[in-house]
Image: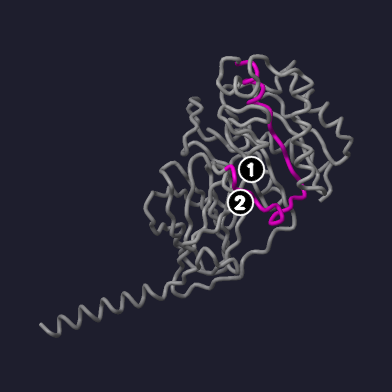
Amino acid sequence: MRKLFYSVLSIVISLSASKAQNKVVKSTDTSHIHYMGRIMMQPDSSVQLAWSGTSVVIDFNSSKVEAWLRDEGTTNYYNVIVDGRVVNRIHPSTTKQLYTLVTGLPEGRHKLELFKRTEWAMGKTWFYGFQLDTNAVILPAPFTKKRKIEFFGNSITCGYAVIDSTGKDRGTGEFEDNYSSYAAITARHYDAEYYCTAKSGIGVMISWFPLIMPEMYNRLDANDSQSRWDFSKYTPDVVVINLFQNDSWLINMPNHEQFKARFGTAKPAAETIIQAYQKFVQTIRATYPHAQIICALGNMDATRAGAPWPGYIQQAVAGLHDNQIFTVFFPYKNTPGHPNVKEQQAMSDMLIKFIDQNIKW
């Protein structure tokens, strides 16, 4: 009996020791982890991820990588990208758990990116760190990329319903994928650092909810009106603004509660619309004095034939007399719902072509 007891104890100790030897990289270890996006360091040594496209990157030599995660709700989804290829999708729960991100990797150096597909309205995720094999080699954090880009946008930029192939245009978490948006595709094309400040339904003057982009653009925690992002932490070379789609609908809805809250009883005149857009662009210019700014619009019905919204943007930009502010209008896709993967790719192709021809970075 005693021999059996010691044998079991020996096995338990052996297993515990083996487990203890797994390499752990804590979320606060920025010497080995590189973050992109507006992240929030937490008192419990976790890192809070909320914004679309926020990502966690690690370089390593190991056959397996796991991550400790906890989610605020049940609607967030993450892509796992290894060596530039999406290999897995993670749907974290509300309890802290260890998730296997990838396993069975061959010997050699690899790069893994944990990429938030869903926007901040889907809730926050707490990332506590990575766990790798016992004999893993953890390499220094990847260097910040040479090029930097930031997008300010709405549902189109978020990738709302982008992978809903049923035509139902469903905006729940499983159908949203910022990684498939024109914004993320463009950033990857240039191997650029990528920050995405976007929210489905948001506008410049009016949104489907009380918050508008001029009130959100400078937040760290988008749900907290007092929270402020430290812009010195990230200075993009190129800024892309793709807004006004929601404004174009809502200014014609006098019975909507946000119309009443923002405008009262009368829709804004063209001059007011132009001034509102111009003021926001001026704010971005003051925030990033040296950035090249692209004022985009589309590809939904705000750019349909005869729509006044591209003209409003053109007039606003012309009035700024700034030769480092440009305009790009994505053609109206003329299909139901939000842009799908193919339509997002077409937007990216057009944006890349424009950047190649006009932007030096």
**Residue indicated by mark 1:** 197
What segment carries the magenta color? 225-253
Label 1 Cα crowd, 10 Å radius (few <14 / some 14-19 / many 20+): many
User: Is residue 330 left or right of 264 when viewed as pictured?
Assistant: right
| Residue appearing at x 74%, y 24% in the figure | 273
Of callouts 1 and 2, which one flags the residue occurring earlier in the amino acid sequence? 2
Please name the colour scheme applied to the rendered image: one colour
Give amino acid for label 2. Answer: Arg
Which part of the image, by quadrant, shows the N terminus?
bottom left
| Amino acid on which the number 1 mark rests in the picture | Thr
The local secondary structure at tag 2 comes to loop
- Horizontal arrangement in the rendering, residue 121 relative to residue 347 (left or right): left
Q: Answer yes or no: do the residues labelled 1 and 2 have beta carbons within 8 Å?
A: yes
Secondary structure type for disc 1: strand
Image coords of residue 342 (percent x, y): 61, 33
Q: Residue at x 64, y 14 (%)?
A: 265
Distance, label 1 to label 2, CA atoms, is 9 Å
Give me the residue at 47% from left, 45% from top. 77
Residue 312 found in image quarter: top right
Taking 270 as reference, is 324 above or below it? below
Q: At 20% from the left edge and 81% from the top edge, which residue is drawn? A: 7
Is 336 covered by the magenta stretch? no
Quarter of the image where one finds residue 12: bottom left
To which residue does mark 2 refer? Answer: 38
Q: Residue pushed farthest left?
A: 1
> How far across and how far down the image is residue 187, in percent?
68, 47
